[in-house]
Image (tube, helix red, strand yellow):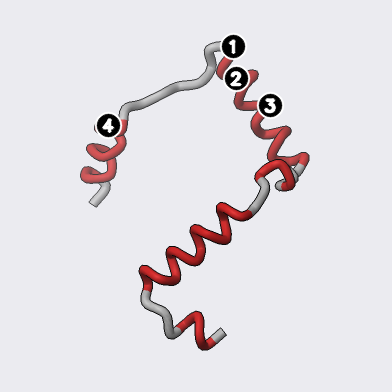
Amino acid sequence: MQEILDLSIDERMSMIERIWDSIDKADIKLPASHMDELDRRLARYEKGETKFTTWENIKDELKGAK
């Protein structure tokens, strides 16, 4: 572990990237609770109940919150 911590941030990030890329995404199991939430959100979207905003509006709101 110490050998990893002794690496530079760039080297560690590169290592993380290589590890992530080595994972077969088909082997990642989506929890049922996540799938249920995605189904709820899709249903709301299909009913027209979802509201969207622009990134500019979000940034303006955050600036106003300070």
Q: Secondary structure at mark 2?
A: helix
Up/down of 13 relative to 66, above or below: below
Mark 4 or mark 3, earlier in chain: 3
Answer with the quarter of the image where residue 53 lies. Answer: top left
- Report the side of 60 relative to 47 (left or right): left
Q: Which residue type carries mark 2?
A: Arg
37 or 10: nearer the eye?
A: 10
Position in image of residue 58 (x %, y %): 31, 36
Q: Which residue type carries mark 1?
A: Lys
The answer to whether mark 4 and mark 3 are in CB contact below 8 A is no
Mark 4 or mark 2, earlier in chain: 2
Residue assigned mark 3: 39
Q: CA distance from mark 4 to mark 1?
A: 24 Å
Q: Which mark is residue 47?
A: 1
Q: CA distance from mark 4 to mark 3?
A: 27 Å
Position in image of residue 45 (x %, y %): 56, 18
Q: Residue at x 53, y 12 (%)?
A: 48
Q: CA distance from mark 4 to mark 2?
A: 22 Å
Residue assigned mark 2: 44
Residue assigned mark 4: 57
Q: Residue at x 50, y 86 (%)?
A: 3
